[in-house]
Amino acid sequence: MAPTTPHGAESAYDYVIVGGGTAGCVLAARLSEDPDCRVCVIEGGPSDVGDERILRLRNWINLLGSEFDYGYTTVEQPRGNSHILHSRARVLGGCSSHNTLISFLPLPQDLDDWVSRGCAGWDPATILPYRERLLTEIVPVAEADRNPIAKDFVTAAARALGVPVVDDFNAEPFADGAGFFSLAYQPEGNLRSSASVAYLHPVLDRPNLTLLLETWAHRLLTDESGRTTRVAVRGADGEPATVRAERELLLCAGAIDTPRLLMLSGIGPADDLRALGIPGHADLPGVGENLLDHPESVILWETAGPLPPNSAMDSDAGLFLRRDKNQPRPDLMFHFYQVPFTVNTERLGYPVPQYGVCMTPNVPRARSTGRMWLRSANPAEHPALDFRYFTDPEGHDERTIVDGLRVAREVAATDPLRDWLVREVAPGPDVVSDADLSEYGRRAAHTVYHPAGTCRMGAPDDPMAVCDPELRVRGVEGLRIVDASVFPTMPTINPMVTVLLAAERAADLIAKEQGARP
Ligand SMILES: Cc1cc2nc3c(=O)[nH]c(=O)nc-3n(C[C@H](O)[C@H](O)[C@H](O)COP(=O)(O)OP(=O)(O)OC[C@H]3O[C@@H](n4cnc5c(N)ncnc54)[C@H](O)[C@@H]3O)c2cc1C
């Protein structure tokens, strides 16, 4: 932890937010509602304002691996796929400017899990009412975007599996069901209602809100009193500078970059950091641990010809299933893609059909957890990510994928979906045994792009908790984390709305604490 100011100017604000992503945009908008409160956002990527490539939801797939993607890779995954590109958005709005904007409230039991992990104040009765505050426009996929084959997938899934057709997954907690998703978008024009569009665009002219774009935070610094309130950045012009928070520094850099920044600043597992020559500031062994994700696999069919063209973002419908009917929550989830997603099957040698669809069964509450760590003290070097996919000793995650591939075939064999499909391309009808389905499913696996948990919150006596339930970093004064890294466990559903709710709550926690100060 370098206590000195690097070359370049130091500017000061009340709150400094590192990362203008999903959570960062919410916090920036909420904290700057008070005109006397000076808020600065440090964002590594460019603005999304007026950029059609970002703002048009259906272009999301073209952003994968683009200039707007940090493009993390993993260490070898002996039981999974070592070739996954872990996309993380480099643009204002963060992953909400890149993702498919599927919007689910967390299920009440997902939040109960957090409370049982020592996260007081994150119970459903406290958190779910924040939905009323969300500024993102969340609506079920519009009728005009409902492709006939996706409709037939929903009908076939409900018929084959005996689950209800769900009109609005956010109307009430659900146990299982098939249906079109709700998306944070404006169907007219296919425009994103990302955290950036919904929260920041309307308030960009606030004089008390400063955005430092294309600016990379690479180390946290202490001030004269020992509080961690300053951050060393490299600006768009390549020049070093320092930004100081007079009230609090808020880390919103996401589940990969928040722990990365902490570790580069000497906040993390002390022995590991010392071995890299990084002076220790706070020994927090949980930083980088508990790397969570939703792993998925893929099953691919060729269709007779081109499909009707309408869609919101090519994966508009899905399915939740309970294999264990004694449980209140689904334990298997599917996205239905009306395009062939072949990035992993092609690498395994399967043909790429000109016209096709796929289903991607995923593991909603995976039991394999991973970790990430720094490879060196060089802030430019990507950290090592080890998701340890499919390594849980009970084999739960692998079993879920095998069951998912079989369930997918049942749905595909059911009217009215059946008539659209010419043949199963991958893994192909000859792959039927548990062992063969597992081998294929794990090698063709992908991520649903939901890393979380790497700075988890927890009870004061939990040695692996990085922050307390009010999101303050333990043993480090002046620093709070607000992003997907604080999740103690993975919610069953796609997590963006959970991040938005967490950021709304964080804004309240910060305001309350500020109000309590003399
Ligand atoms: C392709 C894709 C599809 C997805 N689809 C869905 C979906 O449909 N529904 C859903 O619920 N979830 C989806 N997700 C996941 C969801 O988008 C994320 O979980 C969520 O947006 C994470 O929010 P966050 O605030 O934690 O981080 P982010 O939104 O990633 O924000 C982090 C921000 O910090 C900035 N940053 C990072 N490091 C630094 C630094 N050192 N200095 C300055 N700035 C920095 C980044 O540029 C970024 O803007 C998807 C994700 C991806 C990538």
Image: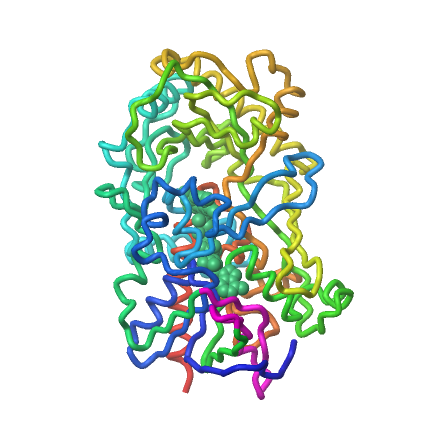
Foreground: 188 or 388? 188
How many tags in the picture? Answer: 0
Which of the 4 quarters of the picture holds residue 441? Answer: top right
**Residue stretch rendered in magenta on the structure:** 214-238
Q: Is residue 482 magenta?
A: no
Which of the 4 quarters of the picture holds residue 430? Answer: top right
**Left or right relative to 302: residue 398:** right
Residue at horizontal 41%, vertical 14%?
A: 421
Quarter of the image with the C terminus is bottom left
Image x and y of residue 90, in percent: 47, 56
Foreground: 12 or 36? 12
**Left or right relative to 269: residue 50:** left
Quarter of the image with the N terminus is bottom right
Image x and y of residue 311, in percent: 31, 32
Image x and y of residue 197, in percent: 31, 56
Q: How is the image coloured?
A: rainbow
In the rendered view, tell whether residue 357 sits above or below residue 132.
Answer: above
